[in-house]
Image (cartoon, rainbow, N blue to C red):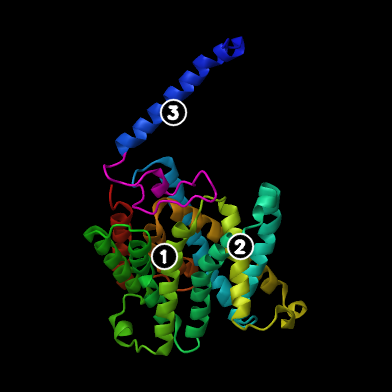
Amino acid sequence: MQRHPLQDRALPHRTRELAQDVAEAAARASRRPAGKADAFAAGSPAGDQGTPRAHGPHHTERGPRTRRAHGHILVSTLLVATSFPVVESIAGDLDSAVLAVVRFALAALLFLPLVVARHGRRVLPTWRSLVRYALLSAPLVGFFFGMFEALRTTTAVHTAALFTFAPAFAAVFSLLLLHERFSLRRVLGLGLGMLGASWVALGGDPERLVALHFVAGDAIFLAATASLGLYGALVKRLHRGEPLEIMTFWTLVTGTAWLLLLGHDPLTHVPWTAFEPRVLVAVGYLALFTTLITFLLTQSATLVIGPTRALSYTYLNPILVAVLAWTLGADALGLAALPGVGLTFASMVVLQTDGW
């Protein structure tokens, strides 16, 4: 069969493209240790939305994508730290359980126009996808609901100390659901992080540790922390290659539905017009920055660096909250807390370089 002249002219270009693809694939293969999972395990989206992802050990190479993921989770951690003083400032004005519903619902409403504009009808999920999103949001809602229930009988000091278990729970669920390895180095890093973050949360005061008397609320919050660790593993397990914006949007929508099903009063019963402007501004900030944006950043980072590394950044929360409180006029961290700061940063180095 006679070939068209334009086809002959396109051959060199196609040959160069093929050679470039082969060279890039060879370079990636040379950097990947033998026996490791392929590029899907690094958190790259699957080519087909319905194609399951591999869930083996993730990449440990220090490429631009990995650096961006660490930057995303660090920004997310900073935003989460800002939520504590904001929530505290409106704690007497709005019930915390209602606030959780508002954060999810308002974040979904704010995100809806952008998601529809970028993805059109692709935003509408299949029933199977909707079940996946509901499964993903369930442990996240479990964390918020458990936290609110726990704070009825326990204190912020107790919850700050127990929250340091979140990365350890994420590591366990990653082992069970993603088959990630559980090295001695990782165990060491998790132990250092728990010790350092608890040290900072307790202000480096041994008497505060001895004075801790655990109550029923502590058991509830520990279960809530385990739920957060499960959420981190499920982000990677349940992602099927769809755009991250769609996954985040439906996580927020199904999360709102879960919270409403848990029996909270309808939002119409809340006297919104009676609130001062500062309360409404605070609610808007929490919905946009510490819910929507943090969900996006956390999910994108988790797909690349894995849930254990991503959640290990929560060890920085006591330090960041203390720094923010100091900028707002509170006392600075005392010298007794500095060893905890050192242990926290040491744990971050150990965990983030595990496998390099």
Q: Where's residue 293, x and y in %?
A: 57, 58
Q: Nearer the viewer, mark 3 or mark 2?
A: 2
Q: Nearer the viewer, mark 3 or mark 1?
A: 3
Q: Amino acid at mark 2?
A: Trp
Q: Which mark is residue 127?
A: 2
Q: Quadrant of residue 62?
A: top left
Image marks 2 and 1: residues in contact by CB distance under 8 Å: no
Q: Main secondary structure of the magenta part?
A: loop
Which numbered disc flags the more N-terminal residue, 3 or 2? 3
- Is residue 292 among what the camera can see? no
Which numbered disc flags the more N-terminal residue, 3 or 1? 3
Q: Which mark is residue 21?
A: 3
Mark 1: secondary structure: helix
How many angstroms separate mark 3 from mark 1 (CA)?
39 Å
* Residue at 29% from the left image edge and 59% from the top image edge: 346
How many angstroms separate mark 3 from mark 2 (CA)?
37 Å
Instruction: Read off the magenta span.
Output: 32-59
How many angstroms separate mark 2 from mark 1 (CA)?
34 Å
Which numbered disc flags the more N-terminal residue, 2 or 1? 2
Q: Residues within 10 Å of mark 2 (few under 14, many from 20)?
A: few
